Amino acid sequence: MHPRLRLTLMLAPAAAVIGGLFAGGLGLALVQSLGYFPPTGERSFTPAHYARLLSDGEFAASLALTFALASVATLISASAGLLAALALRELARRRPVFHTLLQMPLALPHLAMAVAVINVIAPSGLIARLAFAAGLIGEPADFPALVSDRYGIGILVAYVLKETPFIAVMTLAVLLRIGDEYEQCARTLGASAWQRLRYVTLPLVAPATVSAALVVFAFIFGAFEVPYLLGRPYPAMLSVIAQRRYMSTDLAERPEAVALAVVIAAVTGVLVWAYARLARAFAGGERPVLF
Amino acid sequence: MFLRLIICLVCVLPAAGCAPAKQDTLTPEEFASMSWEDVVERARGGEVNYGMWAGDEARNRFFQGPVAARLKELYGITLRIVPNSDVAEAVNKLLNEKGAGRNAGGSIDLLWINGENFRTAKQAGVLWGPFAERMPNIRYYDEEARLRDFGTPIDGYEAPWLRAQFVFAYDTARLADPPRSIPALRDWIKAHPGRFTYIAPPDFTGSVFVRHLLLHFGGGAQKFTEGFDEKLYAKAAALTVEYLNDIKPYLWRKGETYPSSQREADRLFVNSEIDFTMNYGPSFASERIARGEYPASVRTFVFDEGTIGNFSFLAVPFNAANTAGALVVINHLMSVELAIEQGKALGTLFPMDLDKLTPEDRARVAAVPLGPATLSIEELAAHRLPEPDVEYLERLERDWMEKVLRR
């Protein structure tokens, strides 16, 4: 069989699923958000639902919150993940079991992490109970609000705990692959430890770390379960509002909910594109590992 | 979330092309001309998919176990539970199926539904009917349960099934005498900062809590049942919003946030962060005491002016694959026998009109033990208010988000 044909045939099942489910779903969502929604008798194509989002105070507050939380969580996770990878590098090279250990949190669903965070840092959680037993607080209300709180601390904690190992694993894989020859070489040329890190190691791992961070940002921007469980009803992250409006029994809210989901998808798409370009520039022409 | 949305939208498409499984559909006209015995005969040996809210383990076990076995024994019907976490999910699925043109061979044959979801489903034409008035067991139910559901005319598109009523729970070990009126509740909240909160609407328990205020400030529940009155709403909603913003600084965490679900409110109550919890099931506290989740000293109460009660119903989707089977199952679920069994197993409130039962059945109902925290059928009935028209509910939920939550 011709190799090209063979390749096409082998890719066909995956392409059909992606094309049908993903592209098809996105297309349907686009059509609904533009006002084609027969159950309410709407069959026109109109930008009205998007226009209404723009003048919606809740949407503006939510967009700002979503950007802020996704940026902060990504920044913290990327820094911590990079540091963890650098710190564990020697250990992981000699004892591969550490690499495996680091991968284990990846298998934990976000939902489970969110519940774990509630069980530990909520006013009814483990830490509050220990503080009570130690006589540090007299009643649950004395414990600082760390979930459903004003600053989204619960959401940040859950994401940082989940995403740091992910970024560390991605970075560590590159670190182990490139070995230490470049650094040895820089050392023989008289580079200090800081210079080796700044001019040799970081540029080598940057594509991996930045592209992993990009994936994390895009994921947090659109993900639902963590902010649903750990956030406040207002302001809530975009995905939570989209879900609430989609589930509303007032069918007229449906196209707006879908428009919100399209906005999330569009923002994520633009970010992926921008970050991919950034990562390429940063890495001096080398493509980030995930793309 | 977005993925889930896509899956919701797309999963119905491939299915639309499939040939439907074994068909046993009736048109409402065919049903109207058949005798009930013919319907039962036609349903024999079939499989019925029951779309049910599955958030309660005990309830799931009851339907998968004894109820399924009894249906098999009586009618040879195999009952399968199709779980949903909110009936709105199932209604959404039907809307999508209708949009995709899947008019037969649907995955659900009957649906547990009420209120705004019924209104949405009926308006969108995704329900099969009318059928309810031809169910033999409807004779046990009150007229009230056959006319309107949250103000929406039923017109035979759903059959009455269960009765619910809102109650508060409190712990007698912490609190001797709970406030039994809306003004007294305000005073109590202000005297005990941080010890009260309510669930954020649009959660249905939170939503019904704020509806009590609307009915109170509007001058009584009866005025709200006959369609929507803008002037009445404006006056009552303004006072309701004023009340809720007035108590806000004295709520749990100063009203900066609210529990967003029943489960979260229960957690706060059990952890002694708040002194009250609330539920639309009058026996919920007894069930939780029995499961060891609540201390035995928890009791329930209602406002002196009453609390809102409603019915939930059973409906048949427009594309049900086994209509005859669905009707037979619905009629069985509406039987006195099942109501008593369900009362014993789950503590559900007896839904039927006691005057319409035989003396023997009345005695059997009276013999069903109440849980320690459950109010008597008579006390609940004496303090029962009807649900307002569904438009009040939706307007109040929107106003709550705009004028209370976001302030």
Image: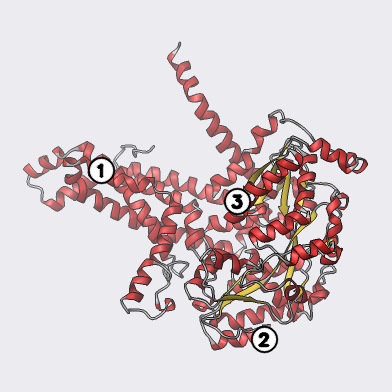
Viewer-proximal residue, B33 or B69? B69
Residue that appears at 14% across and 42% down = A183
Q: Is mark 1 on a helix, strand or loop?
A: helix
Q: Mark 2 — residue? A: B183
Task: Report crowding for label 2: few under 14, some 14 to 19, many 20 or more residues within 10 A (C-alpha).
Answer: few
Query: Which image quarter holds the N terminus of chain A?
Result: top left
Q: Which amino acid does label 2 sit on?
A: Pro
- Which image quarter: residue A36? top right
Task: State how many labels appear.
Answer: 3
Q: Mark 1 — residue? A: A99
Q: Is residue B12 left or right of residue B384?
A: left
Q: Mark 3 — residue? A: B61
Q: Is residue B18 above or below residue A281?
A: above
Q: Is residue B230 visible?
A: yes
Residue that appears at 67% across and 53% down = B87
Viewer-proximal residue, B80 or B17? B80
Q: Is residue B319 visible?
A: no
* Residue B82 horizontal/vertical position (percent): 64, 45
